[in-house]
Image (cartoon, rainbow, N blue to C red):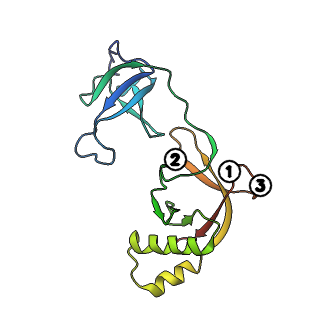
């Protein structure tokens, strides 16, 4: 038997909300704000909310104790789609050395976003030392020797895709083409 869901009057698409994760879920800071993006009344967790700064929807109960309805209602903002140029504020690009962003992929491959091979080597080496904890300089040198230049573009993926964005090889004249130095899996 399916549970009957009673939606409060405040539960409307576009309603701004505040949401706190319980203490055992520490991957998202407490008391984040967001917006209701969809309502699916065929399930108990019928409100899909998107927290500000996230591309993924969370499904919550409309009566959840950690959900607060705020006064503001507005159109649900579209997520950016298509190609983009990453910055230090882009999810996944939170490591930089001397202005060079370094991104680590799920398979532990790395990319240093710079056309300059010396800057790429310095940034990747620092990443290997500080993030991977490699302290043997001969191992760092061996890894850095595998850096290869690539011309790529970064593309936003749809909401709730497995990854927020993908890196794809492109021609140097393509829109948002970026020169990176790529280091395959360690």
Q: Is residue 186 visible?
A: no
Q: Reply above or below: 14 against 115.
A: above
State whether residue 148 is above or below residue 47.
Answer: below
The circle on residue 173 is 3
Displayed quadrant of residue 168: bottom right
Q: Which residue is rendered at x = 28% and y = 23% of the image?
A: 63
Q: Which residue is mark 2?
A: 162
Mark 2: give few (<14), some (14-19) or many (20+) Cα within 10 Å. Answer: few
Residue at image position (56%, 48%) is: 165
Name the spot of residue 47 as percent of width and height, x first: 39, 26
Nearest the camera: 100 or 26?
100
Residue reaching furthest top?
9
> Element type at marker 2?
loop
> Is residue 136 toward the left or the right of residue 144 in the image?
left
- Lower position in the chain sequence, tag 2 or tag 3: 2
Q: Which mark is residue 176?
A: 1
How far across and how far down the image is residue 2, in percent?
A: 35, 22
Pointer 3 local density, CA inside 10 Å: few below 14, some 14–19, many at least 20: few
Q: CA distance from mark 3 to mark 1?
A: 9 Å
Disc 1 to disc 2, C-alpha distance: 22 Å
Q: Give the image location of residue 130, x and y in percent.
A: 39, 71
The mark that comes first in sequence, 1 or 2, is: 2
């Amino acid at each position: 038997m399916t549970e009957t869901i009673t939606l409060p009057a405040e539960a409307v698409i576009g309603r701004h909300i505040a949401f706190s994760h319980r203490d055992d879920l520490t991957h998202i800071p407490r008391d984040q704000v967001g917006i209701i993006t969809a309502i699916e009344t065929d399930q108990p967790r019928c409100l899909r909310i998107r927290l500000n700064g996230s591309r993924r929807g969370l499904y919550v109960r409309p009566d959840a104790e950690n959900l607060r309805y705020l006064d503001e209602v507005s159109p649900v903002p579209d997520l950016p789609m298509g190609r983009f140029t990453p910055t230090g504020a882009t999810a996944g690009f939170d490591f930089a050395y001397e202005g060079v962003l370094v991104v680590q992929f799920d398979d532990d491959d790395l990319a240093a976003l710079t056309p300059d091979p010396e800057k790429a080597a310095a940034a990747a080496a620092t990443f290997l030392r500080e993030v991977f904890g490699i302290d043997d300089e001969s191992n760092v040198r061996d890894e850095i020797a595998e850096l290869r230049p690539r011309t790529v573009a970064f593309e936003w993926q749809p909401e709730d895709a497995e990854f927020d964005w993908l890196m794809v090889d492109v021609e140097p004249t393509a829109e948002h083409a970026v020169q990176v130095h790529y280091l395959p899996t360690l």
